[in-house]
Amino acid sequence: MTVTSTPRTGVTLRLLDKADKEIVKLDRAVLGAFYKFQHDFRRNPDAGGLDLKPLEGHDRLWSARVNREWRALMIRLGGDDWLLVSVKHRSHVHKNLDRFNYGINHITGAIEYVDLQVVEESLLRRGPRPPAAAAPEAVQPPPSVSPSTTPETPLFAAYTDQQLADLGVTTPLIPIVRKLTTDDELLGLAEYAPRHTGEVLLRLRDGLSFDMVMEQVTAPVAVPEPERNLDSEDWQAAVDRSQAVVITDDESLQSILEEGDFGRWKVFLHPTQEKLVHRRFSGPAKVGGGPGTGKTIVALHRVCHLVSRLAPGHTKPVLLTTFNRNLAADLRARLLSLGGPDVLARVDIAHVDQLATRIVSEADPGNAKRRVDDTTALREWRELLVETGETRWNAEFLSDEWNQVILGQAVASRSDYFTVRRAGRGRSVTRAERAGIWQLAERFTQRLETKGLETHRQVAERAAKLEMARKARIDQRAEEQAERGGLRNLHVEAGSGAWLRYRYRHIVVDEAQDLSAAHWKMLRAMVPAEPDDIFLVGDTHQRIYDNQVTLGSLGVHIRGRSSRLTLSYRTTREILQGAMQVLEGAAYDDLDGGADTLAGYRSVLHGTAPSLRGARSWDEEMDLVVEQLRAWHDVPREATAICVPTNGMVSQLADRLARNGITPSEITQDGPRGDRGVNIGTMYRFKGLEYRCLIIAGAAEGLVPRPSVDEWVRTDPSRHERELHRARSLLFVAATRARDALAITWHGEPSRFLAPLLPK
């Protein structure tokens, strides 16, 4: 008899961390069935078509029917509260049931689930193959031991079982951990093990001592010792300590299934990340880390945390900002998904140039100047030099001097320019030369004024000055009020037409490495210097604009409040290794005068190595691109992308794809033009984006880096080094946008940055 599907209230379906990675690999038809299943289950788990029943020999592990061939495995937490841990083919559900292991970790108090058979199969794939001539009945060496007579030393031989258990390693996995002898095997285990276990093992393998791993990884998530043995069967309490998400509505899940990506919806926080989100900082704090380590996720959760501590109201005391319009729009969408409209209502989301424009417009509402980019400004410099007959300096040098020194340090007079430091400019200039440069800078500023033009850097610098002046007035009022014993001067404040106050209480910055000095001065002046005032995330290895700053000199003091994330949750180990080789031999700063590093940066995901192919001409290379896209026929076109060095190549490739029956979708400053087709854009457009499969085309010498970069070798070595860094970073950013597969093509000679990836 079929049970009716009368809706029930209070049915909760949760998704355990790592179950999503298994689900998104399913065939599209199975994903559709899973979407219907979760809807029907939340409506009525007792519906006859779901065939909900416990697995033999298990008191809490149940199976339910997704479709004819697939089953959902769920832990019953109590009543109508369910935790989905896996989706498996029905032929794999009722065999060797002892392999399903689940329980509450005795250290972290979190729910853990592991399929021991899947882990062992993963190790077999990475272990040595048995000798081909061996008889079927011969005993083969275990997967983690070499076929040679002398076994390799196990990776974790220096640690006892008790030490591993004390760190929170899942107990049933300890015997398998004991057999690991290679990094490939370790990564195979970490891919399917509970996340905390993987983190502990990877940190030990990185060389951290037992005590350091205990302090940095285990202690922050450990249940206080007196509470560990109170109730080992309290699954409701355990789920609150677990990395699980409640599936609440069909629309969210439907968008996930259409994108084939749970990452934008379920923002699981790793314990290391969660600690940073909820920590109280005594001042500005920075979180660094390579691509895919969850920096933006941490920033978004940080915003939600800060909003949760606000008193009720209708103001927007929290600012969330980044460096361009595309990323700001993406942050808005993700924050809405994470925190809902109530959080969004208390947050001002704007990119820094938009913010600067708003400030300047408030002060000068009649300003009708047209904003121009750096390329247009450089053209104006060239025309000025032609008109004046000036030959001592080239336009590029003067443009950089104006942007980085005069505007960058708010130099307001000729005498100030004589004394200002020019750190990082490479070429030194005499006092007489400074006088000539200042005169040209004044003429250039007048030229823009006459034409009704202004650069974004000018606007940012003007906004910074306005906000700094506003801050000075606020501080002066505070001093005067303190002198009056805390009483306000109502006549003065009423006469000003407004109560002077800081614009924000908290500021959160994403992609911090690409903001200029003027941007930082503006932001510093917008928020009082108090605990939790500024929280920034970024990675200088991904800097794609020439904005090198030292935050401490701009009033943003992060010393002692900097943290780094090292695990990538997006990119496979193979793609990550290739991308990091692009950076080989280059040094990067940490935004505060020190050095940054990607040491310990790694992924627990496994995939295929990047494909590297050359062609004789651009025409032939475009054929290679078409061929590669056809090889990815089973991947939705909107989940694939092509990244190229120039705008002209974008147009040419789009035309070639269209003629071959492949729909192209160009990425503009507002994002992809459509939601169908292969995305195509220049490297600058790919910041913050993510694709299952990606092609970097045109990675040839003479295009990456462009030829003009080497012209600076003799005239301005510092500029030459910065431009090479920027070109490397663009290629690094592009490569790390790929989740599952990466192909790199070129014509003629491959880029010098690809040398470490090519066969010797």
Image (cartoon, helix red, strand yellow):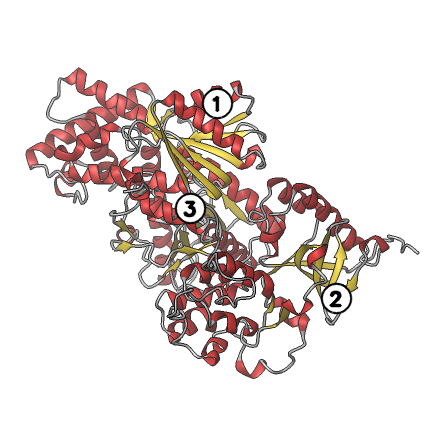
Q: Which mark is residue 575?
A: 3
Residue position for label 2: 55
Distance from label 2 to label 1 (Cα)? 53 Å
Task: Give amino acid for label 1.
Answer: Ala
Q: Is residue 12 above or below residue 104?
A: above
x, y (%) of residue 12? 73, 59
Residue position for label 1: 654
* Image quarter (top left, top right, bottom left or bottom right) of the N terminus: bottom right
Residue at image point 40% right, 23% down: 620
Labels 2 and 3: the sequence-earlier one: 2
Pointer 3: residues within 10 angstroms few (<14), some, or many (20+)?
Answer: many
Q: Between residues 523 and 616, which one lies in front from this camera angle? A: 616
Q: Does residue 470 appear anywhere in the picture?
A: no
Task: Give amino acid for label 3.
Answer: Ile
Q: Between residues 269 and 546, which one lies in front from this camera angle? A: 269
Task: Give amino acid for label 2.
Answer: Leu
Distance from label 1 to label 3 (Cα)? 25 Å
Callout 2 touching callout 3 (CB < 8 Å): no
> Which of the two marks, 2 or 1, is nearer to us in this view?
2
Labels 1 and 3: the sequence-earlier one: 3
Q: Which mark is residue 193?
A: none
Q: SS for tag 2?
A: loop
